[in-house]
Every structure is written in C-alpha cells, then in structure tokens.
Image (cartoon, rainbow, N blue to C red):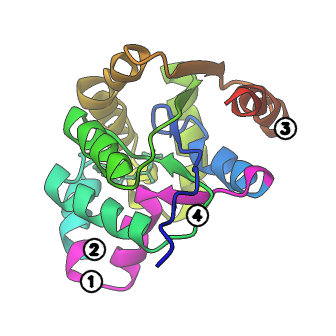
Amino acid sequence: MVQKTKKMTNIVLFGPPGAGKGTQAEVLKVKYQLVHISTGDVFRYNIKNQTQLGALAKSYMDKGHLVPDGVTIKMLNAEVDKNPDANGFVFDGFPRTAAQAEALALLMEEKSSQINAMVALEVDDQVLVGRLLERGKTSGRADDADEAIIRERVAEYYRKTDILKDFYKAQDKYFGVNGVGNIQEITARLSEVFDRL
Ligand code: ADP
C-alpha cells in the first residue's frame, strides 16, 4: 500500500465571537481549496437533528458557555477524519481552550502534519456586540438574540480563548489582521497572510 504523505496547509482562523470567522472561512476555503470545519456549525447541525451530542452542546451554548473539551475534541477529530484527502483545513471556532490547542497539535502530528498558522481577526468588543445583535435579527440563533448571552460569550472568549494567541506566538505562527472593514477588504488582508504560508 502506498503511504499517504501529502503535505497539508492547516490554518486556525481565530477571533472573538462576531469577528467574522465563518464569513471569511467560506470565501477562503474556495480560494485555497481547503476543508472548512466550524465547530459551531457542527454543534448546530447536531442540535437541529436532535442528536445526543446536540442536546448536550445546547445546554452550554444557550448560556453562552463553551461546550466541554472532551466532547468538543472528540467531535473535531471525527470531522477531520471524514476528510482523508484534504489539501488542508481551515479551523473556525477551534481551538478555544489550551487543552483543545494541545489536542489539535497532537492530531496534526498523527497525520504527519502541523498547524501552519493562526490568523486572527482583530475587532473591538463594542463592534462585536453590535454585529451579533444585528445578526440575531435574522440568524435564528438563540445565543445571538440576547445581549446578556452575547456578553457572556465575549467574556468566555477572554477567560479561556484569547490566551491561545500566546500559544501560537511562541511558535512564531501568529498573524493578526484588522477585522474591521467590508468583507472583500478583510478577505484581501487575510489572503496576504495565506499567500505567504
Ligand atoms: P461565535 O464564534 O459567533 O460565538 P460559533 O458558531 O463559533 O459562534 O460557536 C457557537 C457556540 O458553540 C459557542 O458559544 C460555544 O458554546 C460552542 N462552541 C463552538 N466551538 C467550540 C469549541 N471549540 N469549544 C467549546 N465550545 C464551542
């Protein structure tokens, strides 16, 4: 049997809730032929289909809290394994904790690969809350409808997630990008980073 040793490009698209990760990931996956994995989307798919995982995730998501690491990591590993022929991945919403970042590094190592970069969308908190409230008018997402839940998500981000910048900075893999502007402008800024990887 021929051993697969194809080189992948794997990017963590990072930023607080409402930074625009999902929107940009949809554009970038096409442009760079990468598989986009959004943990939020996978959880919402499970909620919609009333799976056990969905019921568990919902109990945390509705409060603006993170879903426990064990559950999230297992799910992410399964999503990666569904795409054995990928050129690489854009991870959107993962990792969100130090334990998740460690697990992702391990998973990539198992695939004889690595995370090439964390590309972070930088947006002020006030702008974030405004964007999420606006999105809540049409998204149907319970966690976007209530300002208190939105603020809790942003607080969770600063409690558990923001420190991951240091994890990737220590490996010289952190790239910050201004996340304020129109969609095309921001895609262009992100592409400048992607093109250098
Ligand atoms: P946003 O980034 O706009 O808050 P997401 O769709 O990425 O939205 O995530 C929605 C919710 O799903 C989060 O608030 C959290 O409860 C849960 N979630 C998503 N990704 C993770 C993760 N990596 N770890 C734990 N919980 C997660």
Q: According to the image, label 1 marks what residue?
A: 51
Q: According to the image, label 2 marks what residue?
A: 54
Whether residue 8 can be seen here? yes
Distance from disc 3 to disc 1, alpha carbons, whole Å, reads: 36 Å
Q: According to the image, label 4 marks what residue?
A: 86
Q: Are marks 4 and 2 in contact (CB under 8 Å)?
A: no
Q: Are marks 3 and 1 in contact (CB under 8 Å)?
A: no
Residue 10, image x and y in percent?
54, 45
Q: Which residue lies at the image location 34% right of the left edge and 60% below the top edge?
A: 76
Q: Secondary structure at mark 2?
A: helix
Distance from disc 3 to disc 2, alpha carbons, whole Å, reads: 33 Å
Distance from disc 4 to disc 2, alpha carbons, whole Å, reads: 26 Å
Residue type at mark 1 is Thr
Identify the magenta region.
Answer: 31-53
Looking at the image, tell me whether mark 3 or mark 2 is earlier in sequence order. Answer: 2
The label number, if any, that marks residue 124 in the structure image = none
Q: Is residue 177 left or right of residue 63?
A: right
Crowd band around label 1 with a 10 angstrom C-alpha radius: few (<14), some (14–19), many (20+):
few
Residue type at mark 4 is Ala
Disc 4 or disc 2, which is closer to the eye?
4
Whether residue 62 can be seen here? no
Looking at the image, tell me whether mark 4 or mark 2 is earlier in sequence order. Answer: 2
Q: Are marks 2 and 1 in contact (CB under 8 Å)?
A: yes
Looking at the image, tell me whether mark 4 or mark 3 is earlier in sequence order. Answer: 4
Above or below residue 78? Residue 120 is above
Above or below residue 140? Residue 52 is below
65 or 172: nearer the viewer: 172
Residue type at mark 3 is Gln
